[in-house]
Amino acid sequence: MNNMNQTIEPLFAPQVDDMICQAEKTYDIPDSLTTGLVYELFRKLEAIAVCGEDELREIWLTAERGSIDDFGDYEDYLEYGEVENCEEFKEIWLMHYPDDQKWYLLSAAIYQEIYSVFMDGKLVLQVKPETRVQYPYDNSGLVKWLLGKVDVTTGYLKAGSYNEYIDKNLPYSKRFGKILREDYWRIFPEVKEGHLKNIDRDEVARFSALIKKQPENDPAARLPEMTADLFFDVCRLGYEANDYKGINESTPKELYRAHADRRDEGLLKLDGSSAEAFDRWYHDQTRYGGHPWEVCRGGNSTHISLYVCHDEKGWWFSLEGSSWGRSVETVKFYLALINHKVPVLLRDGLSLAAMLTGMDYIGIVPERIFPRYCSLLFPGDKILDFMNLPQENRAQIEKAATWYPLREVHLCGS
């Protein structure tokens, strides 16, 4: 099995990409020819074993890069000012198609009689029962190419050579892996230096020692009562530890208003000195939709939260901010609270300690996947930080990383 492009009509990767791009825009308006070919594609794929819910089947396909003339017309690029000479045109070509062949993951699924085809996670073809389209679009060229590819791939599966070929040749940029942060830092020392510039070794060492002794769910101490002003005061400790703007000229309440999420659910309007007012507000079951505990604004996974917790023993705080980008701030926030004997538990504390000492893993996800919210893609591993395989120093990272086994594809009944 020299490659996966034998006996296929010579469509090169740029042509395939153009068809995929068009199909993404028009996946739900197929003409009758395209519809019939999609059904034929699914009939051919029935020879391959299901690998997931909704009769999901997946196989890898490839297309040759072709020549630079298959990529585009130099005169057109020159005319539109995208390049100034042939060398720039070649650079653009190789930037888009650096390898001799390009790989695509074909995924096909059936849900409630809806037939869906994906290329690298992008929906490109979909056929729904009894759907009438006023202005259908012909995507038959893409389906015909896929039909030929599925025929060839099925032949390799029958010959027993498909999985071995994929295992040896699939680029690492298409795979799942993980790399020890310490190893990543050796390759990119400037990343370590830049991220840890605001925290010294003694702080990291102290934090690592403290977090190992932290109770799992039940803090050793409680506060007898809680007020809004006390909450703002505790927030100020974290803001001050991280040199937030306004520390010297703002009250704790003003600092919270400036740096928190602002969807405070009425917290800022409470009588700040009244424990009764806070207790009534805290236990009000009609409150919803706000983010009063998001004390350091950020995205869905890049903010820092300081939750107020309560039980029959009293009040305490729960701190959370485990994204790599906020890890130093979170640790300094935690140390400030500990220094002032504030009862607090830090979520994912051991993982944060591992982050700052280089002992955690960075999850590597395929280039088709955005490296955020990927924890569920690494079952059995506690990974909080993710990346795609970078271009720079790629060979060094590939060698240093641990790569997960690829899922094998089998024929039905085998």
Image (cartoon, rainbow, N blue to C red):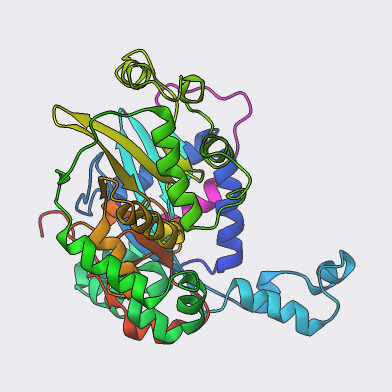
Left or right: where 254 falls relative to 89: left
Along the viewing direction, whichever of 33 and 98 lies nearer the viewer: 98
User: Which picture quadrant has residue 214?
Assistant: bottom left
In the displayed image of the protein, which residue is found farthest to the top?
286
Q: Which residue: 47% across, 82% down? A: 188
175 or 28, which is in the foreground? 175
Asked if residue 135 lies in the magenta stretch, the reply is: yes
Which quadrant is the N terminus positioned in?
bottom left
Whether 204 is drawn above or below 99: the answer is: above
User: Left or right: where does residue 401 sit relative to residue 273?
Assistant: left
Q: Residue at x 77, y 70 (%)?
A: 73
Question: Horizontally, is 269 left or right of 218 in the view?
Answer: right
Q: How far across and how far down the image is residue 356, in percent?
A: 35, 70
> What residue is rendered at 69% in x and 80% in y?
91
Residue 409 seen in the figure: no
Q: Please state the horizontal and vertical placement of residue 278, each as a whole percent of the image.
A: 36, 21
Q: Find residue 303 and report its horizontal and vertical position in percent.
A: 45, 47
Q: Which residues are magenta?
A: 129-147
